[in-house]
Amino acid sequence: MLEPWILLTLGASVIQNVRSVLQKNLAAELSVVGVTYARFLFGLPLAFVFMALAMNATGSLLPTPSGLFFVYAVVGGVCQIFGNLIFINLIGFANFTISTTYSKTETVLAGLFSFIILNDVLSILGLGGVLLTFVGVMIIAAGREKFTLRSLAFAVTDKAALYGLAVGAMYAVASTSYRAASLSLGGEGFALQAIYTLCWVSFFQCVLMGVWIAIKSPIVLRTILRHWRKAIWLGLTGMTASACWYGAFASQKAAYVLAVGHVELIFAYLSSRFLYKERTNDVELGGILLTVVGIMSVVFA
């Protein structure tokens, strides 16, 4: 029987892909900022429902957070907002499968951040994985044009590649922060700690984006409310996926969770091929496969 964290990760990958499809379809109506905020706004009530269910199931009281918990929660929440904004921009001008592949550099970048911050040394296999992933991203970027050594060399400056690396960086910091926040709560099990973290992060995100929108672009909120029947699904799918991710990160090492989560690439490819009629050429597909091999090498290292 599969362990709970694996089931949570698989569930998160499926639901997250559905959410990404919804984001791509609604970006034109709600704008990038509107789509991002709708996800948090309509998802927040569901987070508190999840917390009530977790408390009832575990019979536990609410955890007592420390100051460090709030630091991790705020940092992770802010990075997720920026990562989501960049990702929505990315899927607006790049192939859907390729966009999702770019975001999966999160695993490699998380390893690099650990080396810089914690002085974790990469093994030969790990370093090889980093290089393979970097080359894979360049090949994907170069694959949209005639594939030559020159196009490969300049792929690193491609707009989609740079956006994708930024998405990966933001998500890497966010996922690491969420795991750290959940673990800082202590206690037995993982469900309540994960959902409690999710509630606080979602609250911070709603407040931060709400204030920014109220000051800079109040019309965004009116647009979201006008399209609430569609936008509410962003909140439901986004929050459900987040609850699964948080639970998986709280109960297992992030590297293992992200490794299983790469199954989303398959779902993204199917969505791209059958929903958007986008075609991935042989060079791009090779780059995707090389990227996945690189990421998996880092994980197994």
Image (spheres, rainbow, N blue to C red):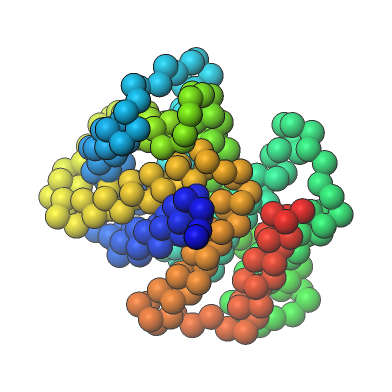
User: Could you say which is closer to the camera, residue 1 or residue 168?
Assistant: 1
Asked if one can make out residue 278 in the rendered structure from this viewpoint, the answer is: yes
User: Could you say which is closer to the camera, residue 62 or residue 24?
Assistant: 62
User: Could you say which is closer to the camera, residue 286 or residue 31?
Assistant: 286
* x then y, percent, for residue 191: 41, 37
Quadrant of the image occupied by residue 294:
bottom right
For image coordinates 35% across by 25% down, the residue present is 60
User: Could you say which is closer to the camera, residue 185 or residue 57?
Assistant: 57
Asked if one can make out residue 198 in the rendered structure from this viewpoint, the answer is: no
Position of 271 relative to 74 (above/below):
below
* x then y, percent, for residue 8: 44, 52
Which residue is farthest front? 1
Left or right of 131 in this view: 221: left
* x then y, percent, for residue 55: 31, 30
* x then y, percent, for residue 32: 35, 51
Left or right of 214 in this view: 83: right
For image coordinates 26% across by 50% down, the residue present is 236
For image coordinates 66% across by 78% down, the residue present is 286
Quadrant of the image occupied by residue 216:
top left
For image coordinates 25% across by 41% down, the residue present is 46
Left or right of 214 in this view: 254: right
Position of 23 relative to 186 (above/below):
below
Position of 4 relative to 132 (above/below):
above
Count of numbered labels shown in the rendering: 0
Which residue is farthest right? 124
